Image: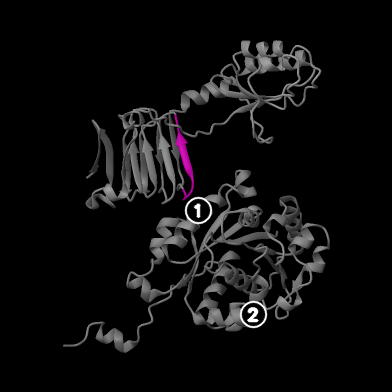
Amino acid sequence: MARVLVVTSGKGGVGKTTSAAALGAALAQAGEHVVVVDFDVGLRNLDLVMGAERRVVFDLINVVQGDVKLHQALIRDKRLETLSLLPASQTRDKDALKPDGVAKVVGELREKFDWVICDSPAGIERGATLAMRHADIAVVVTNPEVSSVRDSDRIIGLLDSKTERAERGERIDKHLLLTRYDADRAMRGEMLKVEDVLEILAIPLLAVIPESQDVLRASNLGVPVPLNNPTSAPTRAYLDAARRLRGETVVMTFPSQKRSLISRLLGRKAIA
Amino acid sequence: MSEAFESRPKLRVRGRSLMAIVLTPELPLADWLGALDAQIKAAPTFFDQRAVIVELTALPSTTPDVAGFLEELEQRGIRIIGTEGAHPSWNGIKAWVRPLANTRASGKPVEIHAPSSAAASAKEANALVIDRPVRSGQSVVFEHGDLTVVGSVSSGAEIVATGSIHVYGALRGRAFAGLKGNSRARIFCRRLEAEFLAIDGLYSTADEIEPRLRGAAVQAWLDGKSLMIAALD
């Protein structure tokens, strides 16, 4: 039974595309057949993060408009054979996305893949609502920071009203993916803590992805995070997240503070 | 000269949007009126106080006795606020109200409920309970009594009721109780972090609320012309 998952957030720049690629790669590594679909028409990034930008011939808009068949637009990942990408158009904008066309494409993708991961654009307008429309599961990406949390709250409200599932009276599974988490800053009160975010958003936690320089490195190389560095902390968190999405119970690991042993022994105050 | 200037009365103008019902009469008119009568019989209060727009695009401009048709509708208690799609040269169209400008042609179909459910829901609908959080950007307006939220009300959300408001969670958004002149309404919450509280038009912004009450379980009520807020324990 294929599952459609939307990676959304409301706020821009919090890690939707990075996470969509990472979760896609993690699920594909586990043997699932996965397609990641870029819904950010006009500002596409998923192809860059997947390292496929030089192989894009046709895109989602071409398929929606019926110019080409789905298989002509799908780009298979070179590293994982069960992972494919359906890129967005860069020259058009989201007005070219027609709801009926998108419904048809998602329907076709459901038949070919186990997981259809929709990378939503930022915002609450047409692109975001179309990306979430057919979702069975939503991953709400949030930074531990007040504006991101409020925007995520808004998007959760929209998930409960603008999806097909909501219109049919069914619940859509929503999961929180807390990204760019820095335990030191949270302890110092510069950043919201995990429990603060959970208290406001009140949806189950999928994973906490620590702030890491590995993520930027992976993006710039065009490699999804788990494939770039299989043992880094973000990779482990994304792999755990993928396992939870597949139904496994995995104990949650929270990023810990980075203080060195010496600084922990001496405490923060200078010794008199 | 300055006296004349100062004594000019101020005119206050407000914008208001409301939901209007669009009726689209079709030929033959007698049959359509029959269907309308049946509908009114099934749901007698449906058209009460509802603003109705009559769309005339389905009627050819040669339809006779359009003015008489207007009377038929008015006799049935239908409050017509405007028409759409009427050609100015229609015989009798001047008797109608003036056509509406800039109306959008689309509109969602409205279900006319059977009276039993309408009456039943009118009896039950004196309290609304919402058992999930009210999210940022959502607005809940309940015009028939008290509103209870089992959960939190997020920053950027709005809850409005003619009665009292009870929030079993954190109230972080805006709450308006006592809509439509009910000055006895109160607001209760488990944690006060509200951006805005109002009862029957009298309000307090977050800045104006005493700092020691923030985060506490409180009730708010009107004492004369003052909005009082006190801790519940």
Residue, x 61% and y 57% (percent of image)? A128
The span picked out in magenta is B135-143
Q: Earlier in the sequence, mark 2 or mark 1?
A: 1
Inspect this view and state whether residue B228 appears.
yes
Q: Residues within 10 Å of mark 2 (few under 14, many from 20)?
A: some
Inspect this view and state whether residue A29 appears.
no
The amino acid beneath tag 2 is: Gly
Image height of A196 relative to B185, above or below: below
Image height of B61 relative to B223, above or below: above
Image height of B178 relative to B44, above or below: below
> How far across and down, in percent of the image, does residue A219 sit?
59, 78
Image height of A100 relative to B5, above or below: below
Indicate which disc residue B17 carries: none
The amino acid beneath tag 1 is: Arg
Residue, x 28% and y 47% (percent of image)? B217
Q: Quadrant of residue A36?
A: bottom right
Residue, x 45% and y 48% (percent of image)? B133
Indicate which disc residue A154 carries: 1
Answer whether residue A59 is magenta in the image: no
Q: Which residue is mark 2?
A: A222
Distance, label 2 to label 1, CA atoms, is 31 Å
Q: Chain of mark 1?
A: A
Q: Quadrant of residue A18?
A: bottom right
In this view, the residue in front, B204 or A17, is B204
In this view, the residue in front, B89 or A149, is B89
Residue, x 37% and y 50% (percent of image)? B172
